[in-house]
Amino acid sequence: AATPPAPKLEPAKPAKPADTGKTGFVVQVGAFADAAAATALRDKLRAAGMNAFTDTVNTDGGKRTRVRVGPAMNRTEADALKAQVKAKAGVDGFVRPHP
């Protein structure tokens, strides 16, 4: 008897497609009231070869300029990036969702 062909395996589909514009993580290394201090840290991280950037948010205490490195697409990459920031720049950070 001929054996039936094996069913084609479809790749697993996520519950809903990931929107890469809205998902990911960054390593936040600081939030400063002084935008110049934030820019200085960003430039230090860039000099160490990292993709650092700043963004400004309004908080209860006034405007803060956050210094962030990334983005990374998943938590594992973000954790590795956090370790790299610590090793290359001596700065501790924490992983945050992005944006």
Image (spheres, rainbow, N blue to C red):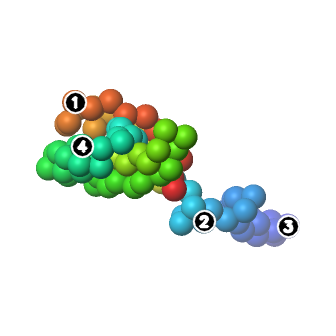
Spot occupied by residue 13 in the image (x, y as percentages of width and height) = 70, 62
What residue is drawn where x is 54% and y is 66%? Answer: 21
* Labels 2, 1: front one: 1
Compared with 29, 2 (above or below) is below
Q: What label does residue 37 carry, if any?
A: 4
Q: Which residue is mark 1?
A: 90
Residue drawn at 75 percent across, 58 percent down: 15
Image x and y of residue 68, in percent: 36, 47
Residue drawn at point x = 67 percent, y = 65 percent: 17
> Label 4, label 1: how many angstroms apart (C-alpha)?
16 Å
For badge 1, the amino acid type reads Gly
Is the residue under label 1 in contact with that under label 3 (CB below 8 Å)? no
Mark in front: 3 vs 2: 2
- First in sequence, mark 2 or 4: give its number: 2
Q: Which residue is mark 3?
A: 1
For label 2, count other residues whose C-alpha is less than 10 Å away and answer few (under 14), some (14-19) or many (20+): few
Residue corresponding to mark 2: 19
Q: Residues within 10 Å of mark 3 (few under 14, many from 20)?
A: few
